[in-house]
Image (cartoon, rainbow, N blue to C red):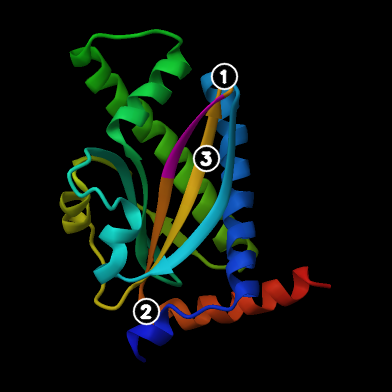
């Protein structure tokens, strides 16, 4: 299978996938609101398919920007990993909004790491859990890990199979009427993607009725 074919989806399939991710993000928001006792609105306005050669350009064209990310690996009916990535400055802003306080840099670094790891844990589990539940997949997840660096550094630390299909989902967080955008990045092993694609096609046909 060529790399071009591996990332070719119809508009209907893309919209169905965006809907699935939005459902998962919605479930994650409910958990976060209860856990953090703060109202967080989440939605995914757009998704894009790409491959590892184009990922850096798609994510953040300014390759020098410092980013904060949470990564979680999964395995089962299909194998891969998923990341939640923010510009570090925006991540700090969101943490300040959630705790309703400004902290000195040293304390903010520690709190940003802990808070984003918890947010990532909830959100990544919710998104992958939604996909696995709707499609009756069985998946096991690793504990999430926190990463920092520029986009090239983050990509170099991700474990993925050659030819993996990558889905980038812009994720909008709204806290206290202020919006912060991150990106959900889902890595799917090419070996299993055809099965997922078939189920997405069935799901998109169902939702069109």
| Marks 1/2: CA–CA distance | 40 Å
Nearer-N-terminus badge (1/2) = 1
Q: Quadrant of the N terminus?
A: bottom left
Q: Between residues 1 and 126, which one lies in front from this camera angle?
A: 1
The numbered disc on residue 176 is: 1
Taking the spot 23% from the left edge, 9% from the top edge, the residue there is 104
Tell me: 120 left or right of 10: left
Q: Residues within 10 Å of mark 2 (few under 14, many from 20)?
A: many
Residue 43 % position (x, y): 59, 43
Q: Main secondary structure of the magenta part?
A: strand
Q: Secondary structure at mark 2?
A: helix
Instruction: Give the mark count.
Output: 3
> Is residue 77 covered in magenta?
no
Residue 79 percent location from the top left of the image? 37, 68
Separation (CA) of disc 3 from disc 2: 28 Å
Q: Which residue is mark 3?
A: 172
Helix, strand or loop status at disc 1: loop
What residue do we see at 21% from left, 38% from top? Answer: 66
Image mark for residue 55: none
- Image x and y of residue 133, in percent: 61, 60
Which span is picked out in magenta? Answer: 178-182
Q: Which residue is mark 2?
A: 190
Asked whether residue 73 is in view, the answer is no
Q: Is residue 181 magenta?
A: yes
Question: Relative to 2, does residue 146 appear above or below in the rendering?
Answer: above
Mark 3 to mark 1: distance in Å? 13 Å
Q: Tell me which residue sits at (35%, 34%) in the image.
A: 117
Q: Residue at x 37, y 82 (%)?
A: 191
Residue 90 higher or lower than 157, as above or below: above
């Amino acid at each position: 299978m060529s790399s071009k074919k591996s990332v070719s989806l119809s508009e209907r399939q893309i919209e169905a996938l965006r809907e699935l991710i939005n459902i998962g993000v919605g479930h994650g928001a409910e958990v976060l609101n209860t856990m953090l006792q703060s109202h967080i609105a989440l939605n995914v306005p757009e998704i894009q398919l790409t491959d590892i050669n184009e990922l850096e350009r798609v994510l953040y064209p300014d390759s020098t920007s410092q980013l904060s990310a949470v990564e979680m690996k999964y395995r089962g009916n299909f194998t891969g990993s998923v990341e939640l990535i923010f510009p570090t400055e925006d991540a700090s802003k969101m943490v300040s909004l959630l705790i309703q306080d400004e902290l000195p840099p040293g304390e903010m670094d520690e709190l940003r790491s802990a808070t984003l790891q918890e947010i990532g844990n909830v959100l990544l589990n919710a998104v992958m859990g939604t996909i696995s539940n709707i499609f009756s997949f069985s998946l096991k997840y690793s504990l999430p890990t926190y990463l920092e660096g520029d986009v090239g550094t983050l990509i170099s630390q991700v474990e993925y199979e050659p030819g993996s299909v990558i889905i980038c989902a812009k994720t909008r967080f709204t806290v206290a009427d202020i919006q912060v955008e991150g990106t959900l990045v889902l890595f799917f092993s090419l070996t299993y993607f055809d099965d997922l694609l078939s189920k997405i096609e069935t799901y998109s046909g169902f939702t069109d009725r």
